[in-house]
Image (cartoon, rainbow, N blue to C red):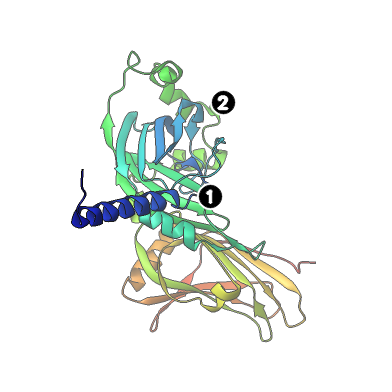
Amino acid sequence: MVISKYNLLILLIVCCFSLTNCQNKKMEEKYNWLGTVSAPQEYPMEVYEGAIVADGFTYSFDSIWGTQNTGWGKEGGTMNVTTERMNAPHQLEFTWYSLVEKKFYTGKWNLDKEKIKSLFDEGFVDQDTKKKSTYNSFVVGLAPQGRVVVWMKGAGNQKEIGAFQAHDTVITKEKAYDNAQYMLNEGFADRMLKDPSYKTFKPEVREKIEKEGYPAADIYNVYREKYNWKPSVVLPEGATWIDFGFTNYNGEQENLFDQSLKDNTYKSRAVPRFCGFYWKDKNNNRYAVWIDAFDDKEIFDLFQKLGKDKNIDLTIKVNEDNTKILVSLESEKEKLAVTKAKIRVSRKIE
């Protein structure tokens, strides 16, 4: 059979395209990551089954994960895997039992693979090692009414990569797989919620629920609302600001130091839940402040008063002898005092 020059050219183009496509697939960057589960302290969730899916790899969840309520955005346990390098995941599927609502929820969603790859590749500088690092875990957040949020987590950094809506479903004891049938036992949810011997809640969380009831189920949407703000620290003359770490109500976390602290500017961020920082005085003595918790109602009211169209400074002013601080939210024309936060100021750190 005689092959014409035209057909030969087409054949060569097809072969080159196929070879390039294969090389691209071969060279696709792989990453080292695991998965974990997060749920609000007040709303414990029971894992039924789930998976974070990548090409050629699936990270699975089942009932062995048990009850999860480490706190919104806070990671739970992880399961090690033998695979060391995986593709970026492209899909999440999850089914769980909400103990407070006594409902099963389920869903399957596409993840933004390109965004995930971009965050992996961009990474960040680890403050402890001063070296380039990147994210190493996906945190699957399960909230009331079937809300799902997924974060990528690394040392001192956590970013939201997706928010989804599950639908309720019915799973009967006959339908459930063997290791999950305990969830369908009569009175299981009530025992987990009401019997202190199960230690589902920390004592202070149980006390708060008994006093105030469960938080509004839609609060986890409110937590995702963002304002244009930055931290601002005012120190005594001659002192040096070293760093600023903070976690926001939406579960995201940042750690500013060195260049990132110099580049500190207004960004669209959720309301801060807690924060802390170090500084050195003019004699090179080191001190620290931790705002362990803002009062939920106060801090949201203050941000809402200033509004989403303003640049807002979370201002922390240290007094002359490094023993007290004043906290406020400030825009160009307004200054609102933060009065109900739980604050610790260290003595001189040797």
Q: Amino acid at mark 1?
A: Asn
Residue situated furthest front in the rendering? 2
Residue at point 66%, 79% (across, down): 240
Can residue 275 be seen from the camera position used here?
A: yes
Q: Residue tagged by mark 2? A: 197
- Rounded to the nearest angstrom, the CA distance separating label 1 from label 2 is 35 Å
**Foreground: 278 or 189?**
278
Work out whether residue 11 or residue 286 is closer to the camera in this orientation and state it: 11
Tag nearer the camera, 1 or 2: 1
Give whichever of 288, 254 is nearer the camera: 254
Tell me which residue sits at (39%, 39%) in the image.
53
Instruction: State the quadrant of the C terminus.
Output: bottom right
Viewer can see residue 341: no
Q: Where is residue 55 shown, x and y percent of the image?
A: 39, 41
What residue is shown with label 1? 136
- Rendered location of residue 204, percent (x, y): 55, 42
Amino acid bearing label 2: Ser
Q: Is residue 227 left or right of residue 120?
A: left
User: Which residue shows up at 41% across the image and 25% down it?
Assistant: 189
Q: Quadrant of residue 166?
A: top left
Question: Quick one: label 1 or label 2, which is nearer the N terminus?
Answer: 1
Q: Residues within 10 Å of mark 2 (few under 14, many from 20)?
A: few
Pointer 1: residues within 10 angstroms few (<14), some, or many (20+)? Answer: some
